[in-house]
Amino acid sequence: MSHPVQELRDESVGQWLPLIEYSVRTGVSLSTIRRKIKSNSIPFRLEKGKYLILLSDNAVNSSSNSQEKWDGMRDRNASMKAEQPHTLTSSNSHFHLNEEQSALEAQLAETQRLVSKQQVRIRELENELEEMTLLVQTLEQQYGVKY
């Protein structure tokens, strides 16, 4: 089990942030942050069951470089997609929509069948409850006891 970094840190160098906020500010994924916590390679602490990560100026600077790399990759991918011809025809998309609609209709029919089955069970239980109530009333009258 990993233990928090026990070094003394000057908090004026940075601030302690929850995982999500740290992830947003630095551009590091939550899974990567969790791996770093597990390997004890990032300064963290545990407060009230929540991990806090020390955000330093170095982390913010390196994240801006990461963001620039990410933007460059995204731009390259967008240009590559623009160069590729679209292979999905209207008939193909119509076929896929029909498949999805059929699947959804089958799911709806199954859900309706289950709801009907549960409604029947509810009526059965209501009848049993009425019978039990009548039995209790009969026994109360017979023995002069009130429950």
Image (spheres, rainbow, N blue to C red):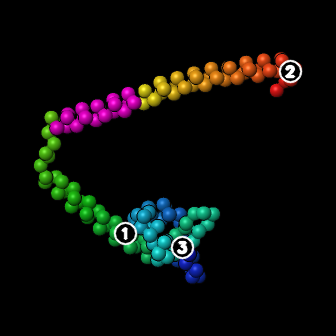
Residue 135 picture location, percent across and down:
74, 20
Magenta stretch: dominant SS? helix
- The residue lying toward the viewer, choosing from 31 and 110, is 110
Kindly report which numbered mark, 3 or 1, lies closer to the viewer in this rendering: 3
Q: Identity of the amino acid at label 3?
A: Met
| Above/below status of 117 relative to 73 | above
Name the element at disc 2.
Answer: helix
Q: Identity of the amino acid at label 2?
A: Tyr
- Indicate which disc residue 143 carries: 2
Q: Identity of the amino acid at label 1?
A: Ser
Residue highlighted by disc 3: 1
Residue 121 picture location, percent across and down:
54, 26
Q: Magenta stretch: residue 133 in it? A: no
Residue 142 picture location, percent across and down:
83, 18
Residue at position x 28%, y 31% from top?
102
Judged left or right of residue 36, residue 44 is right
Q: Earlier in the sequence, mark 3 or mark 1?
A: 3
Residue highlighted by disc 1: 64
Q: Which residues are magenta?
A: 92-110
Q: Check contact, mark 2 vs mark 1: CB within 8 A.
A: no
Q: Which image quadrant is residue 50 in?
A: bottom right
- The residue lying toward the viewer, choosing from 67 and 41, is 41
